Image (cartoon, rainbow, N blue to C red):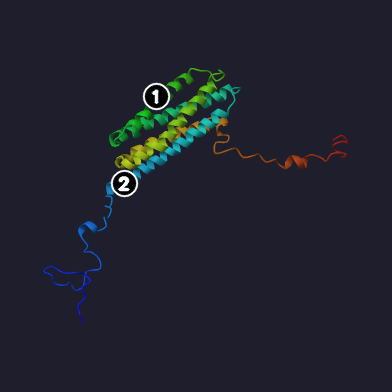
Amino acid sequence: MPKSTRGGTAAGGRPRLHAPSTPPRTNASRPVRRARLSAAPKLERVAWLEIEGLLVAAHRRLQQQFSRVAKMSSRDADGLAEAGAQLVHSLRSHFEVKTGTVYPVLYDTLPDTSLILEAEIEIEVASELIGRLEGLKPFDERYQPTINILGALIERHLEQERVCLFAAARRAQPSFARRMPEVRACFARNASVSADAVSASPALTEGSVGPAAPRRRTSAARVSRPPVGSRESGFLG
């Protein structure tokens, strides 16, 4: 029976019995396995994700404060003055956490620091606007528009941080793991400042979480009121 020459001829002109169905596996064709992250990068990533969550929570508190102050009327000068002072205090505390705790570490980590520079410039402009706000009286016609412009600037600042700066820091994995007790303490102080701002005035506590729920009418008034046309209420009711 003739031997199969499917694989052609081997070296020396002799027919090859059986050619391999697949080429020999070399080191170049082996699948490349992703290297596992060491313990340090994992800890740094977890630490930054926690900081990111703390920043987002602080952003939401500031947005709630701006929303409440914007709904207040200038007729209530005392309440508006107290609300504005608490908002200014919360903003300055929030800026101090960023410029004194978060941004310095990001400067040493991110290859492109333009995002941090933009954030710092926005904070400087907001601080100047806060100074102008403190020089105004609540019944001044420029008081509420100044708060609105400040709120738009802060909203743009927070949005740029969430979209751009947080994503860049997530890729770079800044070294916060060893400094987390200090960072948590700074954010806890900032949260307490915001909580004091909410509970300081009755005008601020109303509708502090989401839209105010509609008030339900009590049935006591309906029961105590006599029916129209009865002897107790008179025929005219």
Return the x and y of residue 174 as percentages of the image width and height: 31, 39
> Badge 2: few (under 14), some or many (20 or more) residues near its Cα, within 10 Å?
some
Horizontal relation, residue 216 to residue 173: left or right = right
Label 1 – label 2 distance at C-alpha: 33 Å
Quadrant (top left/top right/bottom left/bottom right) for the C terminus = top right
Disc 1 target residue: 124
Return the x and y of residue 22 as percentages of the image width and height: 25, 66
- Quadrant of the rendered image containing residue 26: bottom left
| Element type where label 2 sits in the image | helix
Q: Is residue 69 visible?
A: yes
Quadrant (top left/top right/bottom left/bottom right) for the N terminus = bottom left
Mark 1 vs 2, N-terminal side: 2
| Element type where label 1 sits in the image | helix
Query: What number is the disc on residue 200?
Result: none
Residue type, mark 1 in image: Glu
Disc 2 target residue: 43
> Who is closer to the viewer here, 8 or 61?
8
Q: Which residue sits at x=20%, y=79%? A: 2
Q: Which residue sits at x=29%, y=41%? A: 178
Residue type, mark 2 in image: Leu
